[in-house]
Image: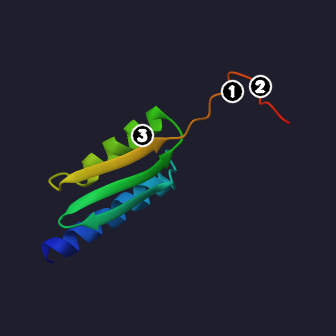
């Protein structure tokens, strides 16, 4: 198995873990880009973001990893909405 095939296998395994582990995070996209792996998307909390990154580092150890994971804002509004 070549290095590229092995990276694709590890990425597929990461996708499976993110979908099936307790985290069940489906909003994260994973792509191989020029020999490195990019994670991007929106997650529900900072704790979820940390867990996704922990799992990714575990599954993709040795591969360059870049991420752009955004935490969705789910806080209650601080002021009423003005309607006209």
Rendered location of residue 5, percent (x, y): 21, 75
Q: Secondary structure at mark 3?
A: helix
Q: CA distance from mark 1 to mark 2?
A: 7 Å
Q: Residues within 10 Å of mark 3 (few under 14, many from 20)?
A: some
Q: Is residue 36 left or right of residue 72?
A: left
- Numbered disc in front, either 1 or 2: 2
Q: Which mark is residue 26?
A: none
Task: Report which residue position mark 3 lands on.
Answer: 49
Q: CA distance from mark 2 to mark 3?
A: 29 Å
Q: Is residue 29 left or right of residue 58?
A: right
Labels 1 and 3: the sequence-earlier one: 3
Task: Report which residue position mark 2 lands on.
Answer: 80
Instruction: Say which residue appears at 79% left-offset and 30% top-offset.
Output: 82
Considering the image in quadrants, where does the C terminus appear?
top right
Q: Find out whether the residues at labels 1 and 3 contact each other: C-beta distance under 8 Å.
A: no
Instruction: Say which residue appears at 68% left-offset and 21% top-offset.
Output: 78
Q: Is residue 67 left or right of residue 72?
A: left
Considering the image in quadrants, where does the N terminus appear?
bottom left
Instruction: Say which residue appears at 26% left-offset and 59% top-offset.
Output: 37
Q: Find out whether the residues at labels 2 and 3 contact each other: C-beta distance under 8 Å.
A: no
Q: Residues within 10 Å of mark 1 (few under 14, many from 20)?
A: few
Q: Find out whether the residues at labels 1 and 2 contact each other: C-beta distance under 8 Å.
A: yes
Labels 2 and 3: the sequence-earlier one: 3
Rendered location of residue 63, percent (x, y): 17, 56
Task: Report which residue position mark 1 lands on.
Answer: 77
Image height of 2 relative to 23, above or below:
below
Q: CA distance from mark 1 to mark 3?
A: 22 Å
């Amino acid at each position: 198995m070549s290095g590229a095939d092995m990276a694709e296998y590890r990425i597929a395994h990461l996708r499976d873990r993110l979908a099936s582990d307790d985290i069940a995070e489906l909003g994260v996209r994973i792509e191989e880009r020029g020999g490195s792996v990019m994670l991007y998307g929106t997650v529900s909390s900072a704790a979820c973001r940390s867990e996704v990154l922990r799992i990714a580092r575990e599954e993709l150890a040795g591969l360059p990893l870049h991420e752009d994971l955004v935490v969705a804002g789910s806080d209650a509004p601080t002021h009423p909405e003005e309607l006209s």
